[in-house]
Image (cartoon, grey):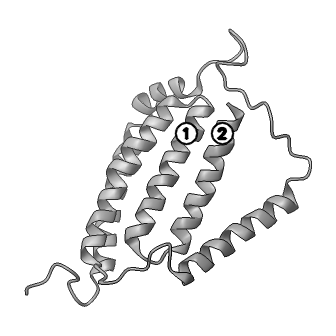
């Protein structure tokens, strides 16, 4: 279990470096999908199955729709991929910085044994995400509505920012 969590954490860091190093929105979206998948794996490893499901449904279902609209409006004829030298240079710079920071600050860390609530004993802990579901629907309804409006506003802001002065790929021929 610890090995799988370390694999998910390394994948999360590599996905974030892939998103940060690539200027093209096409290939950065693949990094976003990898980051969301690795984040779901980390949440599952720590016992948050409902939170993992919410991350998949909300993030991949909603925010990648915003990416699809913005990528359609900001079409590039020759996007830079991960194999290009400037992108590989930035990716390797980010990974070197992360490795240096891990080397500097990892002294005294304990890397083993992270057990979830289900593994720590019979009646010792309850599942944290089950209590969160009840609170989400009883006291968090207003926040869900505010969150939906914020996502809709984010969609319009991203579409307006990517449109610019020209109309991108959607223009009269």
Residue furthest front as drawn: 83
Q: Position of residue 118 (x, y in %)?
A: 64, 18
Does residue 67 lie above or below 107 as drawn?
A: below
Question: From the viewer's perspective, is residue 115 above or below residue 95?
Answer: above
Q: Is residue 99 left or right of residue 138?
A: right
Q: Nearer the viewer, residue 147 or 127?
A: 127
| Residue, disc 1 | 41
| Mark 2 residue crowding within 10 angstroms, few (<14) / some (14–19) / many (20+) | some
- Find residue 5 and name its label: 2
Q: Position of residue 28 (x, y in %)?
A: 45, 67
Q: Residue visible at 53% across and 24% down?
A: 131
Query: Quick one: 14 or 49, which is closer to the camera?
Result: 14
Residue shown at 59% from the left, 26% from the top? 128
Instruction: For the residues labelled 2 and 1, say whether their Cβ atoms are less than 8 Å apart.
Output: yes
- Classify mark 1: residues with Cα within 10 Å, few (<14), some (14-19) or many (20+): many
125 relative to 144 in the view: left or right: right
- Residue 153 can be seen, yes or no: no
């Amino acid at each position: 279990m610890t090995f799988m969590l370390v694999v998910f954490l390394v994948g999360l860091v590599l996905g974030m470096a892939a998103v940060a190093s690539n200027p093209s929105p096409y290939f950065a979206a693949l990094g976003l999908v990898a980051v969301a998948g690795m984040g779901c794996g980390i949440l599952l490893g720590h016992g948050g199955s409902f939170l993992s499901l919410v991350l998949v449904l909300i993030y991949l279902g909603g925010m990648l729709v915003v990416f699809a609209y913005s990528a359609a409006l900001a079409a590039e004829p020759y996007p830079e991929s991960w194999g290009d030298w400037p992108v590989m240079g930035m990716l390797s710079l980010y990974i070197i910085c992360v490795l240096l920071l891990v080397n500097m600050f990892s002294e005294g860390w304990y890397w083993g044994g992270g057990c979830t609530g289900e593994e720590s004993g019979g009646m010792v802990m309850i599942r944290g995400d089950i209590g969160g579901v009840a609170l989400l629907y009883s006291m968090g309804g207003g926040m869900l509505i505010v969150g939906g409006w914020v996502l809709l506003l984010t969609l319009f802001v991203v579409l307006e920012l990517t449109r610019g002065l020209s109309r991108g790929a959607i223009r009269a021929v």
